[in-house]
Image: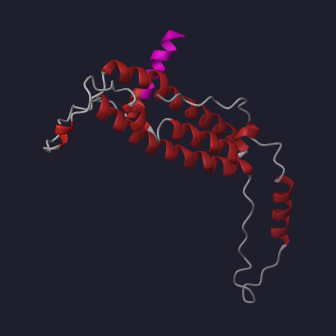
Amino acid sequence: MAQPPPPPERLNAQFCFNTVALRDFLHISRSSIDDSITQNLNALLTPASTGFDPSSTSIRTPRPSNSRRIPQKSCQNFKNQVLFPSWQMRSDVLNYCASVATSPDADDPESVLRQVESERDRERVVDERLDPYSSRFFPREARTERLAALVRQERGVENIIRARSWGLVSERCGEDWRDWEEALNDWRKGREGKQ
């Protein structure tokens, strides 16, 4: 069974602004748990007690719906020790980076350049008869704005991946009436109660 990757060593603003490192962390975490969810769930099944019977392939019989059902205890352990901690770690990183994106950025190396461009744009005289496109001005985005857009995008990806993973877990572990958000929140509450 896969283990969640370790969290970034030092979670700081530079980690968030380094979009390659942020995306790599999310990619590795997703690929080790969610992208291989079927293999992780198959690893929870106990191997057959009898060997392979070649005659079992001579007649096609439909498989009963619960033949690949995973024992409840194994499923619960997988969810509590692997799946939810991995989701929580990614949520923590995205929440931290979202807070960085909404905070003022005094260290932005492009802030002076943006101010100069803005000043030039105000001074510019535009004659749209000569160049109809000259009135267009595309200011540089602040790195906090780019980070906020990236965090929004990655949260959307997280929602899709978690819904898919939770659907497979529910199918293989037995029907769970909760959606993934409710199950994760219940896990968080249980974890807070233990601390």
Q: Main secondary structure of the magenta part?
A: helix
Q: Is residue 27 above or below residue 142?
A: above
**Magenta-drawn segment:** 184-195
- Residue depicted at 31% across the width and 28% down the height: 173
What percent of the width, then of the height, locates residue 127? 77, 84
User: Which sits in the foreground, 14 or 40?
Assistant: 40
What percent of the width, then of the height, locates residue 44? 38, 26
Image quadrant in which you'd find residue 166: top left
Q: Specify whether residue 193 is painted magenta.
A: yes
As drawn, the residue found furthest toward the front would be: 54
What percent of the width, then of the height, locates residue 61? 13, 42
As drawn, the residue found furthest toward the bottom would be: 130
User: Which sits in the foreground, 188 or 116?
Assistant: 188
Quadrant of the rendering where the C terminus is positioned: top right
In the picture provided, is 151 more to the left or to the right than 40? right
Image quadrant in which you'd find residue 134: bottom right
